Image (cartoon, grey):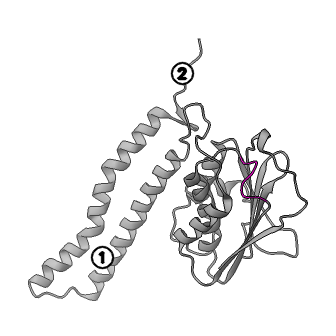
């Protein structure tokens, strides 16, 4: 007799429920700790007492650490929820347009002026198996946001995607500092960050990205661009619907510039 499916992606449902409960119970305390310095400062101000610079700096550190812990709880929930698909593991919904999802992702990221993006797609998603528009937007947000947040200098990000006759393939390459040598597999592990620039994150972005993609039948890999190019490259492959395949093209010929 077949065992019932008790997983959410590759996370057992029992463990997922425990994570939900822990995050729910801990989040309130973390937020209270983050607000506590403000409450104390306001109470002292009401009594005519100005907080000295030393304790004020300590309170700022307390707020920062509480914010970091709250972000970690949020990303832990995102990691578990990233594996949620349809009951048979297939995404329900209509075909998503990568161009539309990318524009939406860029708006939501509110990237600084130092970031320049160029996107080229050989179709409007024709051939791509049905995938929820919010999921595809999240994939693009994480991929682009990861490149932008881990580089403090001006950076160019190029995306190229289309149906290669077997899969829908998206390549994201940036001109930044690149992935550390020998860590192309480890960067997808949860709570890992190898950036030399403090991005303010918790090392969960690429783990969530990988989970979003793999639980939908795709894969993502990291690469060093061929010399003399610098930077980092992510290659994402997503399933195609056989009946919707478009004729593969040697290069992306429909260009969208986003600035």
Q: Principal SS element in the magenta part?
A: loop
Disc 2 to disc 1: CB gap under 8 Å: no
Q: Secondary structure at mark 1?
A: helix
Q: Residue furthest left?
A: 47
Can residue 177 be seen here? The reply is no
Dot 2 or dot 1: first in sequence order is 2
Residue 59's mark? 1
Residue 256's mark? none
User: Is 195 left or right of 52, judged from the image as shown?
Assistant: right
Can residue 152 be seen here? The reply is yes
Vertical relation: 252 (above or below) 59:
above
Which residue is more in the foreground, 196 or 188? Answer: 188
Tell me the mark number nearer the camera, choosing from 2 and 1: 2
Q: Is residue 106 magenta?
A: no
User: Is 123 left or right of 86, judged from the image as shown?
Assistant: right
Question: Which contiguous range is marked in magenta?
Answer: 123-128
Vertical relation: 110 (above or below) 51:
above
């Amino acid at each position: 007799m077949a065992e019932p499916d008790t997983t959410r992606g590759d996370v057992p449902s029992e463990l997922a429920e425990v994570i939900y409960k822990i995050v729910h119970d801990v989040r309130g305390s973390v937020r209270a700790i983050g607000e506590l310095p403000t409450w104390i400062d306001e109470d002292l101000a009401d009594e005519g007492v100005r907080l000295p610079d030393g304790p004020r700096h300590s309170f700022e550190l307390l707020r920062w650490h509480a914010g970091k812990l709250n972000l970690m709880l949020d990303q832990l929930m995102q990691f578990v929820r990233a594996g949620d698909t349809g009951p048979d593991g297939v995404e329900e919904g209509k075909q998503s347009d990568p161009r539309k999802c990318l524009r939406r992702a860029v708006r939501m990221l509110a990237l600084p002026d130092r970031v320049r993006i160029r996107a080229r797609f050989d179709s409007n998603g024709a051939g791509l198996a049905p995938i929820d528009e919010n999921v595809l937007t999240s994939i693009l947000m994480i991929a682009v946001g990861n490149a932008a947040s881990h580089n403090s200098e001006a950076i160019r990000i190029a995306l190229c995607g289309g149906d290669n006759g077997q899969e829908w393939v998206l390549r994201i390459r940036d001109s930044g500092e690149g992935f550390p040598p020998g860590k192309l597999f480890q960067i997808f592990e949860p709570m890992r960050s190898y950036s030399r620039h403090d991005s303010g994150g918790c090392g969960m972005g690429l783990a969530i990205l990988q989970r979003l993609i793999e639980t939908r039948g795709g894969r993502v890999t990291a690469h060093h661009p061929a010399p003399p190019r610098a930077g980092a490259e992510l290659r994402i492959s997503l399933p195609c619907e056989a009946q919707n395949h478009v004729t593969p093209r040697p290069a992306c010929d429909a260009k969208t510039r986003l600035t």
